[in-house]
Amino acid sequence: MSVVWHSMSDFETYYAIFIKYAHDGVEIKCKEGIIMANRLKDEKSPYLLQHKDNPVEWYPWCEEAFKKAKEEDKPVFLSIGYSTCHWCHVMAHESFEDKEAAELLNRGYVSIKVDREERPDIDAVYMSVCQAVTGSGGWPLTVIMTPEQKPFFAGTYFPRERYYGRPGLLDILREVLVLWKERREELFRDAEEITAMINKKRVSGKRISSSEKEILKKAYQLFGRAFDPVWGGFGSTTKFPAPHNLLFLMRYAKEEQEAEALHMAEVTLNAMADGGMHDQIGGGFSRYSTDERWLVPHFEKMLYDNALLILAYLEAYQITGEEKYAGVVRRTADYILRELTDEQGGFYCGQDADSDGVEGKYYVFTPKEVEAVLGREEGRAFCRQYGITEAGNFEGKSIPNRIGRVDSEGKSIPNRISGVDSEGKKTGIAGKDTSEEKMYEYRLKRTSLHKDDKILLSWNAWTILALTRSGIVLGEERYLDTARRAQRFIEEYMTDENDRLYLRYRGNEAAQMGQLEDYAVYALALLELYQAGFQMEYLTGAIRRAEQMVRFFEDKESGGYYINASDAVQLIARPKEMYDGAMPSGNSVAAMVTQKLAILTGDVRWQEAARRQMDYCLHEIREYPAGYSFTLLAMAEAVYPHRELVCTVGKDVMDGQEGKMVKLLDGRMGELVRLAIQGVAVLVKTKENAEELAECAPFTKEYPLPKEGNMYYLCEDGVCREPVREIERLRDL
């Protein structure tokens, strides 16, 4: 469908109406042709496509844009965000759809839009600028710079006009143009100073004097000081789940027999599970909570949050045996399978906070609405179960939650979503006759959520890892099957002719060179897949990706790993990230990957790589180790006793059709997998894989294959036990 007008005067008169049509997918034309589509129309990024009909003449990040800025002697306006970012939408509606703002940008600037999820390297460079200049950062990220990509202004969200002390975007744009014309040398001087500042190298120096265990203890104590003993989490207002913080606390509790560390993790996990941040109807978690009780979330759901939370709840389940944690894992994993899985096997990025332009509309209910769906009696019971009241808890309506609802014994009332289907299989949504299922189906029909359907490799790798571990711990083969399918998707669709990884896939197109996180997290996921069935393809794949990580990303002079590869087109700075924010940093995961490979393979090159990376990390994290919890987990792998087990098999155990490891002669494959998920580094040597395994783990070359049965060789913290034939004896050891 097209809307056509005859003259530009019509466009001036009906501008607002045309904008609405454009956002509804209607093509806007005049006699000169289509003008309501900028250069973003051919991009694949959902975020960039959201801005394709802006009157702003956006460019994607490209050489053409900077060349134009130089030729026309204009500064560059850079805006960075992502498709499910609420304040990105607000700024777009206020300013980038505004005729006056667009005219100012088009006349005085060359404007560039960047999806931070597609180009984390660009985001990292200019976010470091924003943090250095303003002391904080976030999205939308707003930067103004020279045609040489050197920034002289940075901030985040700006309203169109000045608002309660916050400068307005129009004022900023006008002022910069005056400075560009009259005092440009000052802007250029600032740009040079800022560029020099973010390029200043920090030398890691020698290994610090503090012991690793002292650093782990310091981190635990720092978490204790920030812990909210009532509602869990850390801090008093806005709370982020940060699952890697909880994983560290649980590991510390286990290794140091520190009950308070486990208590902090459990209080937090329980409060999150009961709150509105946890989608009580459809499963999965929102991005973060805007209050201390985890009740009112910022409603966007992100794939990586849910994958990492699966790992945290799984760990709690393994430590405590509490079925409520297993239930949260199933609901979260099933949410991913149901709503974020592409038909080809990859996983989508997430879902927006807004429906019909209203934040949270998709998730909230009124009692009247519930009773209309369920009937009076069932509806009232549902409202009691999930705290849905006339007064509401969010803008007059209610976010379903279970905060404070306990049974006669004072225990939290369990969420009833996790049920059993007609075939007896556990599912994340209960059977068709339950209230929860009825409300879920009603919610789907009532309104819809925007889905960011691009597939990011590192986020998919976290999900592969989480689903693999879920499949093993919970005995759910469907999770393992989904994880293996996603891994095949990456190898088929997100790998180039040179066996290098792509960062993003969407619309049958893979794009953007893979970055540090892609290689590091994918290698970690492949190691997890290997421990789920001991198939050599996963071990060799993990080593291959880790080798590429070291080759293309390691800083051979100062230590650590850069975000972008050595053969990528370089920006004004080559950033490194160490801090573990919403996700573990690439450097933290690199530390974990090299440490796990060092333990599993015994190969000196991985031992040296792990030592180099840990030396770099120790120097970086020593002042505030609580900000680097995934690095602490990698450190724990090295510091605490670790066990290695080699199983040698006396008969062919490979399925010739698919090359999968099948049941071992003594029927103990499940026992080996169970040991692996408990932290034992397990290798399985057979007649078929002996040569390939020796290339991966050279020490296994000397292990003889028995004529019949199996042999088990257990080592612990550098000391090897006498080999045994019965796997049951390993429990005693």
Image: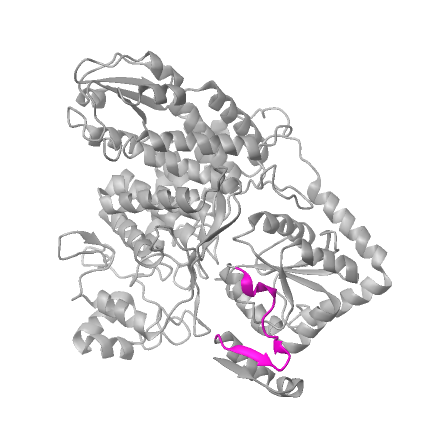
Measured from the top left, where is residue 102 in percent x and y?
A: 66, 72
Question: Would residue 321 appear left or right of 490 to someone viewing this image?
Answer: left
Question: Would residue 394 appear left or right of 726 to someone viewing this image?
Answer: right
Number of numbered markers: 0
Vertically, is 598 above or below 588?
A: above
Q: Is residue 168 visible?
A: no
Residue bounds of the magenta highlight: 25-43
The answer to if 29 sits in the magenta stretch is yes
Image quadrant occupied by the C terminus: top left
Measured from the top left, where is residue 175 in percent x and y?
A: 77, 67
Vertically, is 95 above or below 539?
A: below
The way the protein has been coloured in the rendering is one colour
Could you say which quadrant of the image residue 55 lies in? bottom right
Could you say which quadrant of the image residue 695 lies in? top left
User: Which residue corresponds to the image point at 44% horizontal and 65% vertical from the top-left?
Assistant: 353
Q: Between 162 and 99, which is closer to the camera in this rendering? A: 99
Residue furthest to the left = 423
Question: Would residue 562 appear left or right of 580 to someone viewing this image?
Answer: right
The answer to if 152 sits in the magenta stretch is no
Q: Between 610 and 582, which is closer to the camera in this rendering? A: 610
Measured from the top left, where is residue 253 in percent x and y?
A: 36, 35
User: Which residue corresponds to the image point at 53% horizontal and 31% vertical from the top-left?
Assistant: 550
Q: Is residue 250 visible?
A: yes
Measured from the top left, where is residue 592 in percent x and y?
A: 45, 33
